[in-house]
Image (tube, coloured by chain):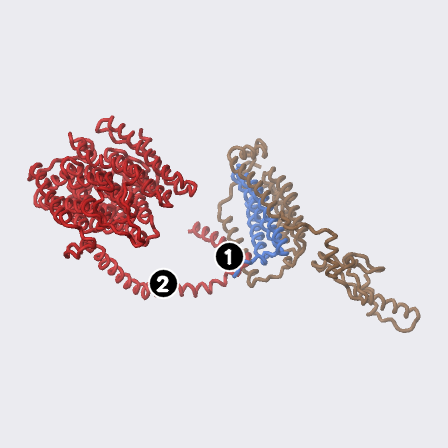
Amino acid sequence: MNPVNYLYLSALLFTIGATGVLIRRNAIVVFMCIELMLNACNLAFVVFSRMHGNLDGQIIAFFTMVVAAAEVVVGLAIIVSLFRTRHSASVDDASLMKL
Amino acid sequence: MENLIALLIAAPLLGAAVLLVGGRRLDAVGHWIGTLLSTTSFVFGVILFADLLGKDAEHRTLTQHLWTWISVGSFQADVTFRLDQLSMTFVLLITGVGSLIHLYSVGYMEHDERRRRFFGYLNLFLAAMLLLVLADNYLLLYVGWEGVGLASYLLIGFWQHKPSAATAAKKAFIVNRVGDMGLSIAIMLMFTTFGSFAFGPVFSHVGDTSEGKLTAIGLMLLLAACGKSAQVPLQSWLGDAMEGPTPVSALIHAATMVTAGVYLIVRSSAIFNAAPDAQLAVTVVGAVTLLFGAIVGCAKDDIKKALAGSTMSQIGYMVLAAGLGPIGYVFAIMHLVTHGFFKAGLFLGAGSVMHGMNDEVDMRRYGGLRKYMPITFITFGLGYLAIIGFPGLSGFFSKDKIIEAAFAKGGTEGWILGGAALLGAAITAFYMTRVMLMTFFGEKRWQPDENGNEPHPHESPKVMTIPMVVLAFGSVFAGGLFSFGDRFLDWLEPVTGHSEGDSPLSAGTVTGATMVCLLIGVGLAYAQYGRKPVPAVAPRGSLLTRAARRDLLQDDFNHVVLVRGGEHLTRSLVYVDHTLVDGVVNGTAATFGGLSGRLRKLQNGFARSYAVSMFGGAALLVAATLLMRAV
Amino acid sequence: MSPQLAAYTTSTGEAFQFWVLGTVAVIGALCTVFMRKAVHSALCLAGTMIILAVFYLANGAYFLGIVQIVVYTGAIMMLFLFVVMLVGVTAADSLKETIAGQRWLALLCGVGFGVLLFAGIANASLKEFAGTGKANANGNVEGLAALIFTKYVFAFEITGALLITAAVGAMVLTHRERTERARTQRELAEQRVREGKNVPPLPAPGVYARHNAVDIAGLLPDGTPSELTVSKTLRERGQVRDVSTEALNDLRALEQRAEERLERTEIEPANLKRAEEASK
């Protein structure tokens, strides 16, 4: 097997995650789909690292994880406060920008 | 020593900031703060002057680079000051006369509630004027140029509760704007022509530039000078500017700011020397203005407006001299300095008279004041003798040189210019004698004003008379001090250059002719105003007199040609705007409005819907990238 | 196996692992998207992440593999579950689409994007693999550390600042400032009395003698269930068991059995069956 298959898997997971973001209404699930996309990217980075034979790709994946952690913390806090004020975790309910 | 240059400007600037920001709690001491900082600046000026005197003539240029102001590509503007003999002369004049007038204002503005603000504006003016004369490039000069315009506007309209003062301030500001536009165009032309607007590079590149471009720059600079120095055709604001407090008229509209145009022309001497057509225009403007101002000065009954006409005329002399080229530059500046002394002294005297006469300005209501105001009479009288060119006093030396230089221009031009200058000297003698006689001699003609307050003429307090005395000393001795041994010539020559020219008349002949003109002027005035009593109400007078009372119809001309013409032009433009431009614009707007009304439906407010658009966009980008790779 | 060959293919073991676990990972991802309940989605996602961790290990990223399990699956996913617990189950869980055309557009974009990505990867000439053997010669963690603390030290420091900011931000966002004093029990009781509503304690859930579970509404004297007796959370989730008809059915079954014993009438199987079912 050629390790490039990992990249196909990564692309597949990314696409599934992106589609999930678009079709799910529950903000928490949307968030999980975003995490899935980030993980798919990380897989690609790790495989790139293996391709090039240096560790820079792994470093980037590591930073992605850190940023994802920060993002999750803030994002979940936003969801909690949103739920508290609007009693809903649906992304469709946050549509005040509409006329 | 260079570092002192910035302090020259910083002191009055600090004063302006403190006084204008400080608020009411500084009301009690504000005027002394202003005077102190102005004097500080003068002391710095004297120190720098002493330093310059100690150097060789070639090394008398100091520069101080503070910081780079604008740096965009080849557009480099530095905040750099340049102190050479020319700026030094101005610095001493500005800070010296300025400090004296600060001191005078302490007394003159004593009963004004807003005295602190007045001193703040005066300090602001000093800072801007110093910036103007110390700038090392035209852009920085422009900052100062606008700064003095602002200070002038604020001070003319200082008594803004009077509609006439508010209108006069606006008039001065707007007319000055026309001139300022000339300066800004000149700066732009310089940048496109020379690639710089610093004095050094501009003057050194003059040699390899076509005469046409230099003429254009010169004419624009002349326009700027006309606006600031109240030269024909932008002269109309100066008479109305007398609405400001008298110290302002003395400092800004007689001694310093209005001479900025002369400074600009002399500073740009390298450009004018290489553009004879522009020089000719300068001389014509100067000659016309010197006669124009003098004629207006003869007809005015308002003492300050008569002096304003005189100022215009005297600056006309300076501009004429500056237009003569190297023959005249030094004398333009010399006359500028002596004029600074005697005209400021005359204005302060006029202010003193008004101070004692319940702010009456009509000379027909004065008369016989010499007994009541001896110090004012003597100082005013010395200023009077100086301005008409009485032998031995300041005006004699400087004006005489200008008349000689005008003849030395040579050819027909020389005769015409010299004749105009001579005629001007006669008229000067006439109107100044008229002012003198109507104010200090003859019967007393004052009457109670509408409130029934009889004026009680009295001498002004010491704080006002001391500056007048000092200025009177300047009016008497400055000219002699400058002329003996050609001191002033030697001092300025490294900056402006000098040549003698070939006069068709000998110096003695010119002086003699001037004396004759002087006597004719004085004699005529005496015959009309000294021998006969002055009527309390102005007689109808001849056509010329009536025109001169209306400033030779300049405002009417402006109104008919510029205002009416402008209105008609505007109306037709409005019509075009409404039908053609608005039609196109509204049509476009309606088209887009309809389109967006339909497109708006895409914006349904759901975040997920927008996410689809983003994702689709990302997909398109990937597709485009792949496509470009494939191609 | 020569080194040259190793650069083109992987070992059979790894290939086997990839195909098995890769399938599971894709199924997990699909489940994450399509599971109705957020809890299930979270668990599926955790599974996918663990599989990804195994892939990291297989690709020589030992440190990342462990971090993926400890930090991602262990910490972040648990944070998700925690928030799911806080928020509870909502109507947003429904998979029914409310925006017209959204689902089809999303699928179209997703498929199109996926195809493009696949095309891009296929288009790139990724035949040669250097492998991480050389880079990991001194150990994976040491190699990463050497890079992080030299080449990427500024990025590393900035991410530290980012994490602190995120922590503070989360606290600010979730912290609720109380604008008024919390009301005491006494005040609440007084308010109830003043309003004349629910003066005694709320009625207890459950039906005495037959059911005492909290998800069963208590019956009013007329036999109708009372909403008030069941916890608000269960009510909102729609997890209340309705037993209002159950008692009647039971009663009928009892009568029937009694009559049966007394041999009065024939057995009615349908009725009985329904009753039996209901009683379960």
Residue C269, compared with residue C123, is above or below; it is below
Q: Position of residue C205 (x, y in %)?
A: 78, 58
Depth check: give the residue in front, B256 or B208: B256
Marks 2 and 1 close (CB-CB < 8 Å): no
Distance from label 2 to label 1 (Cα)? 31 Å
Residue that extends furthest to the right in the rendered view of this protein: C262
Depth check: give the residue in front, A2 or A65: A65
**Label 2, on which residue?**
B585
Horizontal arrangement in the rendering, residue C138 relative to residue B343 (left or right): right
Label 2: which secondary element: helix
Depth check: give the residue in front, B609 or B48: B48
Q: Position of residue B312 (x, y in %)?
A: 21, 46
Label 1: which secondary element: helix
Q: Chain of mark 1?
A: B
User: From the image, which quarter does the N terminus of chain B lie in?
Assistant: top left
Chain given the colour red = B
Q: Earlier in the sequence, mark 2 or mark 1?
A: 2
Q: Look at label 1 and name its amino acid.
A: Ser
Q: Look at label 2 and name its amino acid.
A: Val
Residue that extends furthest to the bottom in the rendered view of this protein: C265
Q: Chain of mark 2?
A: B
Q: Are marks 2 and 1 on the same chain?
A: yes
- Note whether residue B314 is visible: yes
Q: Position of residue B577 (x, y in %)?
A: 32, 63
Chain given the colour blue = A
Q: Position of residue B95 (x, y in %)?
A: 29, 36
**Label 1, on which residue?**
B613
Q: Which disc is residue B318 wearing?
A: none
Q: Residues within 10 Å of mark 2 (few under 14, many from 20)?
A: few
- Note whether residue B76 is visible: no
Depth check: give the residue in front, A34 or B418: B418
Q: Colour of chain C?
A: brown
